[in-house]
Amino acid sequence: QDLLAKSLFVVSFFCSRKDTDCARVDYIIPTITYQLARSGWASLESIRNLLLDLDAGMMPLQEQCRRWLLPLLSAINKVLTVPIVIVIDALDECDSQPLVQHLLSSFADLPPSLRVKFLLTSRPEQAIRAAFDATDPLIEQLDLDHVPGESVQRDIELFVRSNLRKLKKERRSVHRAMTGWPPEHQVKALVEQAGGLFLYPASACRYVAEGLDISERLSEVVNLEKGHAMHLGTDQLY
């Protein structure tokens, strides 16, 4: 929470089985390195050294980390006072869990003096759990099943409002009379229908966005009868 209250410098990689490139573990460090190099905070010398060492991209992850990531992070640390946060989402979506273990081990070997934090998300796959268990105690694990419900609801509401606000902006030229849209009671209803699951509002917002009349579509979604079991609402939405 203290970290989130500060200004941050964030780079990211989002893994996905649906995209061959986004499922490759060996693309993670080169992508992060590229983002760091383009940030404007890396020194010209560190970028020059990076360009002279392009073969490191074909080397094992430990070498990529040592020869690319470490020098850039060290150079940026000298001029940037805010923490660097490296976000890697959905590690379980990668094509090689053994390589994920090597990646996590490489991150754990970085000097603790660096002002860098890694935010890693994943399903609790056995290989990834084993990699976390083998690293030092500076790693903090958060089980999302134990996140307070009110915190999840706040995040879902923020997600819904952000998506509908963006949709309203995109459609304003088509739907002139959009003052007061979306109605507050419909936003609240959609958040309540989610039942703590991001899948529901994500699917609902996508359904609304695909319609010609977004007001009508939003009304359709929030007027779905809510079942006694949480999953019934999702079934009806699909």
Image: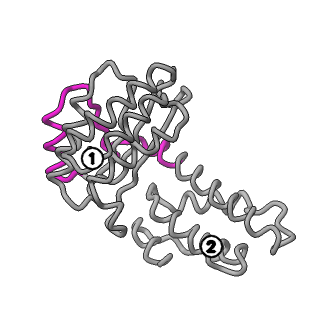
Mark 2 Cα shell of 10 Å, populated few (<14), some (14-19), many (≥20): many
Q: Which of marks 1 and 2 is in front?
A: 1
Number of callouts in the render?
Answer: 2
Q: Residue at image x 51%, y 33%? A: 9
Read off the residue under disc 1. Answer: 55
Q: Nearer the viewer, residue 225 or 126?
A: 126
Q: Residue at image x 80%, y 67%? A: 172
Q: What residue type is labelled 2?
A: Val
128 part of magenta stretch: yes
Q: Which amino acid does label 1 sit on?
A: Asp
Q: Residue at image x 60%, y 57%? A: 160
Mark 1 Cα shell of 10 Å, populated few (<14), some (14-19), many (≥20): few
Residue contact between numbered discs 1 and 2, judged by CB atoms under 8 Å: no
Mark 1, secondary structure of its residue? helix
What percent of the width, then of the height, locates residue 182?
73, 62
Which residue sits furthest bottom? 212
Q: Residue at image x 32%, y 37%? A: 68
Q: Which of 165 and 9 is in front in this view?
A: 9
Mark 2, secondary structure of its residue? helix
108 part of magenta stretch: no
Q: Which stretch is magenta?
A: 124-153
Which residue sits furthest front? 52
What percent of the width, then of the height, locates residue 40?
55, 34
Relative to 142, 81 lies left or right: right
What percent of the width, then of the height, locates residue 188?
63, 57
Q: Which mark is residue 179?
A: none
Read off the residue under disc 2. Answer: 208
Q: How is the image coloured?
A: one colour
First of labels 1, 2 by sequence position = 1
Q: Which of 228 and 118 is in front in this view?
A: 118
Relative to 207, 90 lies left or right: left
